Image (cartoon, rainbow, N blue to C red):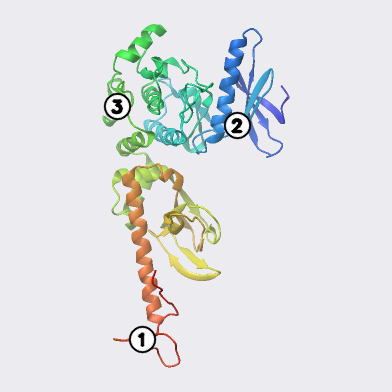
Amino acid sequence: MEQIGKYRVIRELGKGATATVYLCDDPDSGRQVAVKVIRFGHDSAAMSRRMRKLFQNEGMVSKRLDHPNIVRVFEAVVEDQFAYLAMEYVEGFSLEEHTRIDKLLPMHRVIGIIFKCCMALDSAYRQGIIHRDIKPANIMVAANDEPKIADFGLALNMNKDLDRDSTFIMGVGSPAYMSPEQIKAYPLNQKTDLYSLGVLMFQLLTGRLPFRANNQATLIYRIINTDAPAVTALNPNLPEGLNAILKRALEKDLYSRYRNGAEMAKDLSAVRYQILEEDETAQDTRHFETLRRLDFFTEFENIELWEILRVAVWREVLPNVTLIREGDRNKFFGIIVSGSVEISIDGKALCRLGPSEPVGEAAYLHPSSDQRCSTAVTLEPTLFLEVNAAALALSSEELLERMRDALLARLIKRLREVNRIAAARGTPAVQGGTAPLPGSSRPGGLDLELTPM
């Protein structure tokens, strides 16, 4: 194909049983996109109707999802003979490439990838969406080990009435990764995706599936009736803590399985810390130790620091670079690791901040407004830990509370300093009375007036 709708085909990226994916140019945006094309067969009208429903479902569901670890969908078009989906092009690799024992990723990378997938699935479920087909081929990995979950064609919209939902099709999914309740065609919730993610994690760590068989009937029996082996039994180099996480993710009893992705991610953070300590992974260990030495993080637990490392970006910033601009609207914030930053309002310098000081915390903490009221510019080469507020919102409750307390403590400390400076520049206080100073209509001090609420 040379043209798909408005998209000019560059080359074929891959071909499956029902769809072909092409790399294309988008003339409107100037970016490259991946376009998935499905042709409706002439030999089976029922199969064509089913494929049309699945495709329409993927387009509708994916457009609702906005998360850095979920593939974005830009356009879905259904014609009489074929349909196509224009989506974010992910330049990287599929996790399917790293499921063989001789191609396994280092375990600290696996934990980091699965951690982010947990957060993405948690975000999708908050939108009322479960994926139902989590498997290695449906997760791409971009630069910096950023996973991108794709193929929401089998997704189930929990906000719809399932009895009348035409996109609800029983028996979908890839058998080896299906949960016991999915195999039994029971009602599904977010826990089915966490089960499938547990199977995937088991495979990425060991190079094998937790349940294996020579035929599908035996495989289904084992998924429903037998327990998975401990991962440390298959790989003694893995930390013991992974056994408990995978056991809970692969629980057949729904009440014992993880309730949501954030809960599973929290446990992964603890094991991530153990793994990095044992592997002595240079960069992450160095980053952890740097945070541990900063005054701002004194009260943070080690596990919480590892969570911070997952939702933050280390930025080496040159002098005279604007980190935050007055009037902009956003909620990210950060911590100065080294260097200094000048804060100004209306072009007038307010203060200078150094290591351990937060920047941009006021907009993050404000309950309703994300408008910036000051500008922050680097004064020298500065190492800045930029925190993704959206990702932080999906972190553990303990981390959120600790971060909020630490930011409020710094904010109050600054307010007290401002009060002290303002008082030093004020006129003497009226002792024991409220008589105005000569030539003044109100008591001395700053020209402020407090009115009862």
Q: Residue at x 60, y 31 (%)?
A: 87
Alpha-carbon distance for marks 1 and 3? 66 Å
Residue 320 circle label: none
Q: Is residue 218 left or right of residue 327?
A: left
Q: Residue at x 28, y 53 (%)?
A: 299
Amino acid tagged 3: Tyr
Residue 428 circle label: 1
Q: Which mark sits nearer the N-terminus, 1 or 3?
A: 3
Mark 3 in CB contact with mark 2 (< 8 angstroms): no
Kindly indicate the quadrant of the structure image that contains residue 203. Answer: top left
Amino acid tagged 2: Met
Residue ID for mark 3: 255
> In the image as oriented, which residue stretches furthest toward the bottom?
438
Q: Residues within 10 Å of mark 2 (few under 14, many from 20)?
A: many
Alpha-carbon distance for marks 2 and 1? 66 Å
Amino acid tagged 1: Pro
Across and down, in percent, residue 142 comes to 52, 34
- Element at label 3: loop
Q: Residue at x 42, y 35 (%)?
A: 122
Q: Residue at x 33, y 44 (%)?
A: 397
Judge by depth and name the residue closer to the eye, 26 or 80. Answer: 80
